[in-house]
Image (cartoon, helix red, strand yellow):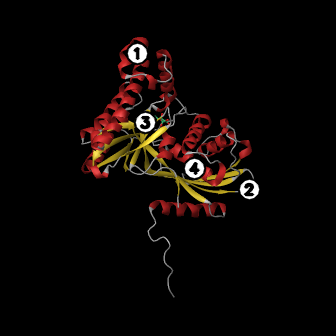
Amino acid sequence: MSIPPNPNPNPNPEQLAAEQLAAAFETTFGDRPEGIWAAPGRVNLIGEHTDYNDGFVLPFAIDRTAMVAIRRRSGNTARLISSYGQPELVSVDLGTLSAGTMNGWTAYPLGVVWVLRQMGIETGGFDLYLHSTVPSGAGLSSSAAIECAVATAFNELGAGGLSLNELVLVGQRAENEVVGAPTGILDQSASLLSTAGHAVFLDCREQSSKLVPLDLAANGLLILVIDTKVTHAHATGGYAARRASCELGAEVLGVAALRDVAASELNEAAGLLDPETFRRVRHIVSENQRVLDTVALLDDAGPGAIGELLTASHASMRDDFEISCPELDLAVETALNHGALGARMTGGGFGGSAIALIPAAAEAGVRAAVESSFAGAGFTAPDIFTVSPAAGAHRVP
Ligand code: GLA
């Protein structure tokens, strides 16, 4: 008797996770899924709060994804379950979906389905099993990862024929109108447009993008994420207030968006704006320039040259935009004192994660120093891990 060859002798971690997800799906729903789609979370290398100001951002997708297994079913009922926590099956009549009534994690997949319906695109009934390795509340776009996985899945299952840029807007609309967070296009663009080994340079006014090589390993570098465990929600509080300040600044300065204010016009702007609005405006104007400078430096000199820009971005968010917190500041300061070339908070702020660009040889030292500084300050222990620029949303083969 001969043993048949293993059809897949070296499955990669994603395929292994997908096989486990397919098995869990079958146990729950009694059938194999039609397919499995994965979409990544993101780290924003630089360009914070610039997206809704029509400005520039430079994120990259990380090697942590939301994975959805889906099978369409007859009728108009969706059944959804997530591996997170205590799995609980949620059953929803899609005919009753309305923007104001969704909550919990199902608001992300169902929000996308609702947006598609608003666009006249029907998904029909379906079963969905979610498994995500993007930590939630860490500022790494766990919600956009779910939205983008679901949008990509239904688009491929024949519901839409939408372009990647259109899928970005579907995810953003779900976030804005269903979840209630007035966010821009940064997160969904990173999750959908990324390619391994690159960052995505995005002009948010034009919705045009360019891939910028970000080969950390070849330069002996890595990026550490320091998740402070301070959770935040952009549907409430500070995020919307910052957005309102930016809109006020643009209105007083008579421009369509803060993208249109040049650094050389800041002196004049200082005389027209109240001091707080001026600081908010100065962050956006200077941050846009830092994104352009970072892209130029990556092209000319590689990632080892961008550290100071990252650190300057953090100072601007701490002092001018005021969206940092003591834990993020301590993470950044400690990393810089122990060999980081640059460090900054990433994402919307008020908690979440910092990133540190470090020589690979400094990793153990930075980790130990951040852990002990957090313990010394009486802060919750952070979660520290490396990320590498990964592929955007895709079907798992
Ligand atoms: C959150 C939002 C994004 C962006 C960032 C800040 O991640 O979802 O649209 O505004 O904050 O840069």
Amino acid at circle 2: Ser
- Ranked by sequence position, the earlier of labels 3 and 2 is 3
- Mark 2–mark 1 CB contact (< 8 Å): no
- Calculate the distance from the C-alpha at mark 3 to the C-alpha at mark 2: 42 Å
- Which sits in the foreground, 207 or 3? 207
Seen from the viewer's position, the closer of residues 372 and 255 is: 255
Q: What residue type is labelled 4?
A: Thr
Q: Nearer the viewer, mark 2 or mark 1?
A: 1
Vertical placement of 133 versus 275: above or below? below
Question: Mark 1 or mark 4, which is nearer the start of the sequence?
Answer: 4
Mark in the foreground, 3 or 2: 3
Q: Residue 74 carries which label?
A: 2
- Where residue 130 appears, x then y in whole percent? 57, 53
The residue type indicated by label 1 comes to: Ala
Indicate the secondary structure of the residue bearing disc 2. loop
* Residue to which mark 1 is pinned: 269
